[in-house]
Image: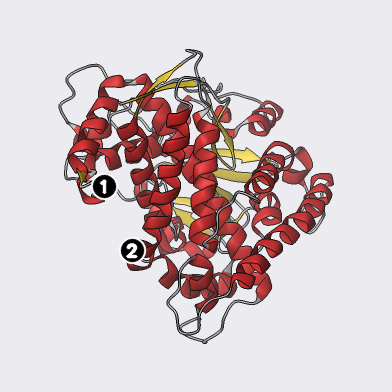
């Protein structure tokens, strides 16, 4: 199925094609592929993955299927999603830091959590949180303006800003005292424990690998830290009968609409960890990539700046007028999807696009590949925000920055509002250029991360 024709939009100049890793040889050995996966799964995929509808393979005695057909993806993630669960490797990597929160839970536990959390993330519930987003963003802009003569690490700046937004929207307090510790936890886990090792892939989930022992030690320290944040927020209290003022209030007040159950303290802690980590890390990374692309593409950056100026009324941004800015974020997440890979294991036999699938076979839906697939996108490796402004959206199962189906990211609206406003504020305030010209490569470590943090020059507008 091709949807390239949807994007026959006029582009007056040659579009930017940002750097990306070379594709792996299609005949790479199993051990070569394992080494590549250990470094970054993005570098383990060959030419066929970007051209074929389905790529079949074998890995440790199991069949694997990389799906690039929207209808086949719909079958796995929507029509028969209960037949597909997270892979053991995915659980090993994510559970120590996310616990049994919404991203990890399965079956009845997941349904309870999803039903209970859903009201806290509706557009109506997110609107009262926008002032928290704007306040943290304005403070970041002010700090950067004060230091605008020196080169700046915008990746770190976006991480600090997104963390501040996460803290304020979750707890209504700033992250001055706790932000450094939280960043240290995230960096430690990403560098030491998030990369799957050989035994993580080989051993059954019930058999702990050496990495699992280290992950368990990390989890003990991490849950104690999250518990401390919750205790501090509870000590701040909430007036009786007062409306919820942050996500912690909303999640604490939430009840399963079918059973009336509230979250236990342990469950609430896992939800807090999930929302803070999934929210701040993915948004910060998406904003870094958007700023990087706009630094490489000054004409598009000026188009965003003009729109921001036109969308500012009496000093306030009207997000409904930021259509091109939103398209820039959409295109950024196409080229650098927050979740680069969705891996599922079959619980029972099935048939996908006419192909037999056995129990325990592994289904791979890789937004990194899907968003750059030759059959699904025109100029798939180019940065063309206009492709999201044609009035005809891409196929729902060819563009998955937040997943799709029952397990679509519950915070997608929150993240898009935050990222669009933050990017508008940054480009409205500064002209952004790169100090060094060495390419920044995307690598897959839970999210699509940059290989390094380049320095930027920011000039006040």
Mark 2 → mark 1, Cα distance in angstroms: 18 Å
Residue 224 image point, x, y percent: 75, 61
**Does the rendering let one see residue 398?**
no
400 to 26, vertically: above or below: below
- Give me the residue at 72% from left, 41% from top: 188
Q: Is residue 197 left or right of residue 395?
A: right
**Position of the N terminus by quadrant:** top left
**Position of the C terminus by quadrant:** top left
Q: Is residue 365 left or right of residue 70?
A: right
Mark 1 surroundings: few (<14), some (14-19) or many (≥20) residues within 10 A:
some
Of residues 106 and 292, which is closer to you in this image?
A: 292
Q: Identify the residue position indicated by label 1 in the image.
A: 317
272 to 33, vertically: above or below: below
Task: Name the secondary structure under disc 2.
Answer: helix
- Give me the residue at 46% from left, 32% from top: 144
In this view, the mark in front (2 or 1) = 1
Mark 2 surroundings: few (<14), some (14-19) or many (≥20) residues within 10 A:
some
Of residues 120 and 34, which is closer to you in this image?
A: 120
- Give me the residue at 80% from left, 45% from top: 211
Residue 386 image point, x, y percent: 22, 33
Judging from the image, the colouring scheme is secondary structure
Q: Residue furthest top?
A: 437
Find residue 123 and name its label. Answer: 2
Find residue 411 and name its label. Answer: none
Of residues 275 and 234, which is closer to you in this image?
A: 234
**Does the rendering let one see residue 367?**
yes
> Nearer the N terminus, badge 2 or badge 1?
2
287 to 277, vertically: above or below: above
Q: Residue furthest bottom?
A: 259
Residue 205 image point, x, y percent: 75, 56
76 to 239, vertically: above or below: above
């Amino acid at each position: 199925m091709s949807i390239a024709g949807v994007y026959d939009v006029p582009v007056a100049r040659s579009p930017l094609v940002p750097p990306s890793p070379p594709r792996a040889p299609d005949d790479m050995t199993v051990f070569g592929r394992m080494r590549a996966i250990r470094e970054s799964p993005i570098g383990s995929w060959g030419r066929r993955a970007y051209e074929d509808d389905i790529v079949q393979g074998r890995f440790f005695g199991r069949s694997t299927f990389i799906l690039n057909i929207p209808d086949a993806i719909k079958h796995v993630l929507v029509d028969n999603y209960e037949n597909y669960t997270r892979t053991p490797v995915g659980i090993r990597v994510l559970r120590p830091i996310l616990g049994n929160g919404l991203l990890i839970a399965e079956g009845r536990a997941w349904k309870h959590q999803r039903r209970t959390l859903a009201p806290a993330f509706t557009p109506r519930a997110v609107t009262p949180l926008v002032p928290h987003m704007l306040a943290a963003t304005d403070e970041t802009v002010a700090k950067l303006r004060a230091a605008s003569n020196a080169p700046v690490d915008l990746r770190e700046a976006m991480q600090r800003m997104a963390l501040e937004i996460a803290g304020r929207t979750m707890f209504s307090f700033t992250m001055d005292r706790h932000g450094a510790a939280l960043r240290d936890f995230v960096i430690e886990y990403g560098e030491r424990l998030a990369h799957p090792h050989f035994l993580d892939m080989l051993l059954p989930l019930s058999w702990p690998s050496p990495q699992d022992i280290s992950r368990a030690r990390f989890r003990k320290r991490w849950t104690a830290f999250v518990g401390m944040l919750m205790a501090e927020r509870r000590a701040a209290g909430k007036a009786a009968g007062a409306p919820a003022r942050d996500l912690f209030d909303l999640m604490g007040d939430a009840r399963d609409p079918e059973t009336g159950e509230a979250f236990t303290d342990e469950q609430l802690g896992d939800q807090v960890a999930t929302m803070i980590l999934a929210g701040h890390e993915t948004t910060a990374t998406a904003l870094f990539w958007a700023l990087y692309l706009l630094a490489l593409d000054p004409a598009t950056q000026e188009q965003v700046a003009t729109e921001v100026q036109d969308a500012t009324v009496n000093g306030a941004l009207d997000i409904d007028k930021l259509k091109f800015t939103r398209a820039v974020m959409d295109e950024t997440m196409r080229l650098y999807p927050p979740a680069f890979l969705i891996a599922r294991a079959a619980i029972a036999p099935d048939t996908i696009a006419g192909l037999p699938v056995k129990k325990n076979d592994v289904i791979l839906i890789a937004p990194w590949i899907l968003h750059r697939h030759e059959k699904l996108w025109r100029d798939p490796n180019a940065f063309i925000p206009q492709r999201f402004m044609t009035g005809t959206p891409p196929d729902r199962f060819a563009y998955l920055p937040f997943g799709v189906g029952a397990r679509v990211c519950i915070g997608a609206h929150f993240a898009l509002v935050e990222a669009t406003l933050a990017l508008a504020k940054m480009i409205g305030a500064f002209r952004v250029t790169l100090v060094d010209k060495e390419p920044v490569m995307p690598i897959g470590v839970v999210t699509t991360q940059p290989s390094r943090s380049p320095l930027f020059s920011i000039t006040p507008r």
